[in-house]
Image (spheres, helix red, strand yellow):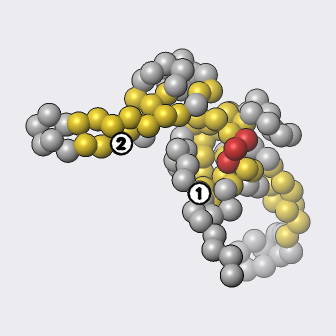
Amino acid sequence: MEVKEKLKTRIKKNDSVKVVSGNSKGSVGKVLFIDREKGRVIVEGVNIIHRHTKPNQKNQQGGIVKREAPINISNVMLMCPKTNQPTRIGMNLIKDEKTGKVTKMRLSKKSGEIIIS
């Protein structure tokens, strides 16, 4: 029996990302959903598909509905908030002087700035 592991990613929901490969290469959008088990993300305005739907209670008209399809998480890079360029992400341990609590923060490799989301 195969055990699926959840993918540990450094990209979170509502992050601004740039597509670096595939049909939507160069597009920038906001992450709407992350499927960690399949390793896929849905990005706003990227990889648009046309879904043909029959009329139903919710959609009385029916017709063609445009919506985003998932793409592989390896095909997107986080946008650095300082330089507004795609960047790799590192992790940094930061200790709070008052409480002594250590927290993990995401770090932009390009600018060295901490990414807060």
Which of these two is toward me, 93 or 20? Answer: 93
* Position above or below: 49 against 78: below
* Position above or below: 91 against 83: below
Is residue 14 visible to the viewer in this orientation of the structure? Answer: no
Residue 21 at x, y percent in the picture: 79, 36
Quadrant location, the C terminus: top left
Q: Residues within 10 Å of mark 2 (few under 14, many from 20)?
A: few
* Position above or below: 104 against 36: above
Dot 1: what SS? loop
Residue at label 1?
7
Q: Residue flagged by tag 1: what amino acid is it?
A: Leu
Question: Cβ–Cβ below 8 Å for labels 1 and 2?
Answer: no
Residue at point 49%, 18% (across, down)? 111
Residue 30 at x, y percent in the picture: 60, 41
Quadrant location, the N terminus: bottom right
Q: Which mark is residue 107?
A: none
Residue 31 at x, y percent in the picture: 60, 46
Which of these two is toward me, 62 or 70? Answer: 70
Looking at marks 1 and 2 on the same chain, the residue that comes earlier in the sequence is marked by: 1
Residue 27, image quadrant: top right
Residue at label 2?
104
Q: Residues within 10 Å of mark 1 (few under 14, many from 20)?
A: few
Q: Tell me: 32 left or right of 51.
A: left
Residue at point 67%, 33% (across, down)? 18
Dot 2: what SS? strand
